[in-house]
Image: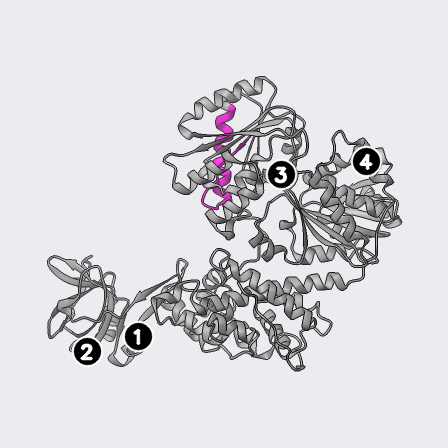
Amino acid sequence: MTPPSTTSNPKAVPPKGRPEALFPLFADAVKLPGIGPRLQKLLEKLTGPKVVDLLWHLPVGLIDRRNRPHIIDAQPGVIATLEVTIGPHTPPPRGSRAPYRIPCTDETGEITLTFFHAREDYLRRTLPEGEKRVISGEVEAYGGQIQMTHPDHMLTLEDAAKLPPYEPVYPLTAGLSGKVLTKAILAGLERVPELPEWMDAAWARQQKYPHWHEAVKAVHQPDSPQAVDPRHPARARLAYDEMLANQLALALVRARMKRSRGRPLSGDGTLRRKVEDALPFELTRGQRVAVAEIESDLKEPYRMLRLLQGDVGSGKTMVALMAMLVAVEAGAQAALMAPTEILARQHAKTLEPLCEAAGIRMAVLTGRDKGKAREAIVAAAEAGDIDILVGTHALFQGSVAFKDLAVAVVDEQHRFGVRERMELSSKGVAGTDVLVMTATPIPRTLQLTAYGDMDVSRLTEKPAGRKPIATRALPLERMDEVTSGLGRAISEGRQIYWVCPLVEESDVLDVAAAEERYAGLKVSLGARVGMVHGRMKGPEREEVMTAFQAGEIDILVATTVIEVGVDVPNASIMVIEHAERFGLAQLHQLRGRVGRGSAASSCLLLYKTPLGEMAKKRIATLRDTEDGFVIAEEDLILRGAGEVLGTRQSGLPQFRLASLEAHADLIAAARDDVELILNKDPELETERGAALRVLLYLFERDEAIRYLRAG
């Protein structure tokens, strides 16, 4: 795709704070006609609380109201819009369950309108006998006659003139009807202002894009069946606007990091050599390349912001340690933050012997540390008596200060947003370099949308000694065979994960499934069985995990809370029940919990027959490869972007208008556009720059505007 060009515009005064033109869009939707307090919560649940949220709620289909036959030509099973004369009402006898019927005629025949649980006063008011009305709905055949049950529309001739030829169909929620939602959206459209054009004029012409306010109206008032196609110019225009706001916000964060003076960091390599000498293995080529990229960043006079992507078991922690050692060699401090206490302590356990070998002072600080023990660690960090501090989000807290924090490593980046990583880096005195790590391989399309403000290093090899994991798929009917095989494995001293199925995106049902399997395995194997799930309190869950790590539990029954980061080298068998319900990347993450020790490891995928085509492809891909990047790309193709990092903890931007499948090419175009914009107008001070500020406010990327000097 040809990237947009940007033109130089005369200076303009950029707006400060949300522009007044956007006020009607950010008003409460409850004030729109027909909503009111009763429906407010339903509307908020479905779309969000503001008028603009309604406008971002796009139709998923259309009803064609153009078919306007005479009654004699109306076909059963087809939606028809008919002009009829209302005949005598026939209410059912009192207490009867019979429907309310109204015969209607035109010069060619008769059709009966049928209503269940009808309110007679309403129907007599809406459909007065002897008057002409326009009715629209699906025609049905019943008892040799044609009828229309609960017509979608019953209109006067005057109102019928306003009936659109194509009626949008919206996603709904229980208790909120399509009519009410459509009425609210149409009222919201009346508030749509004309905004300054932020799009490059040549690009808009090339793509045949309408102006923004025309595009918003076009998607909600379609004039053709193509209007719901994501590639339709109006939809594509709105998708591009959203992508542009996203890419611009990320670029401003990045520019701010680059502008924030860091300090050149370079050590003499003594600590890194000591650590390498203490390692029982050689660093892989990929690890050495990543370390070299990080060392190069650290030498620069601006702050590093780098993403380290590495598949499960690719050796990210070693790379992070080398990065932190550069800071320590330079006389400064480093911090490593993980999303959970168990992960933080696991990192500390990995790093401790290496730090000891090199004479590095390391400490751990998590929410569990209280009282004098905590005070001592905090005081030591502030005094500079700790070189590397490992912890959870407790490292964010205001009471934690460092004497000289130079490098901050954030593990499992998709649990942390832009604001959190900025907050952590602000703990540094002269500007902290930030390295973020994720074990979730991210396809390039998603990488641009979620991590476009970062440089990226990828680890694609597994460290020496890592054994392949034998992956097999078996139908659930062979469950007895599986459990007897597990009994033999336990007698050989092996440990097992048993992951229970996702149930309708419900924590409660997930837990019920886990508890049922837990009870069943205790009975069938008589083994030491433990259980963890997302509704357990943190300390309770960590107690079970610690017992499993210590070998006091043979089988750990779990929901997907074990997906990220848990390291139990003796666990060599992974059973995933109802594997067809999991996404490909998620199955790969779960499989990566085994294969970490010396024993041959296996992953059993238990599935319910018959398997659908997509599930077959997922399981075949998992059997064929252990390359997380190949798997991530395939997952994106099979499932789409919304679920590719796992539905519950994904940190992907929530796009309302853009589809990463349909609009993937627009991401790269928006990124190119932003690069040109910021090269010519880094503070968004020109006429187009002022319009782009409006765009950022429109898509609630206000945070990014604060990074502008003129913001």
Q: Please state the horizontal and vertical placement of residue 360, each as a whole percent of the image.
A: 85, 39
* Amino acid under disc 4: Val
Q: CA distance from mark 2 to mark 1?
A: 16 Å
The residue mark sitting in front, 3 or 1, is 3
Kindly identify which residue carries mark 4. 275
Q: Earlier in the sequence, mark 2 or mark 1?
A: 2
- Callout 1 touching callout 4 (CB < 8 Å): no
Foreground residue among 513 and 364:
364
Q: Earlier in the sequence, mark 4 or mark 3?
A: 4
Kindly identify which residue carries mark 3. 312
Q: CA distance from mark 1 to mark 4?
A: 75 Å
Residue 391 appears in view: no
Q: Which residues are magenta?
A: 498-522
Q: Secondary structure at mark 3?
A: loop
Foreground residue among 290 and 638:
290
Q: Secondary structure at mark 2?
A: strand
- Whether residue 681 is situated above or below residue 436 in the rendered picture: below
Badge 3: how crowded within 10 Å, few (<14), some, or many (20+)? many
Q: Is residue 502 magenta?
A: yes
Badge 1: how crowded within 10 Å, few (<14), some, or many (20+)? some
Q: Earlier in the sequence, mark 1 or mark 4?
A: 1
Q: Earlier in the sequence, mark 2 or mark 3?
A: 2
Instruction: Give the main secondary structure, helix, strand or loop, of the magenta stretch.
Output: helix
Q: Please state the horizontal and vertical placement of residue 99, each as a whole percent of the image.
A: 19, 60
Q: Which mark is residue 163?
A: 1
The residue mark sitting in front, 2 or 3, is 3
Kindly identify which residue carries mark 2. 132
* Amino acid under disc 3: Val
Q: Please state the horizontal and vertical placement of residue 35, each as a whole percent of the image.
A: 43, 70
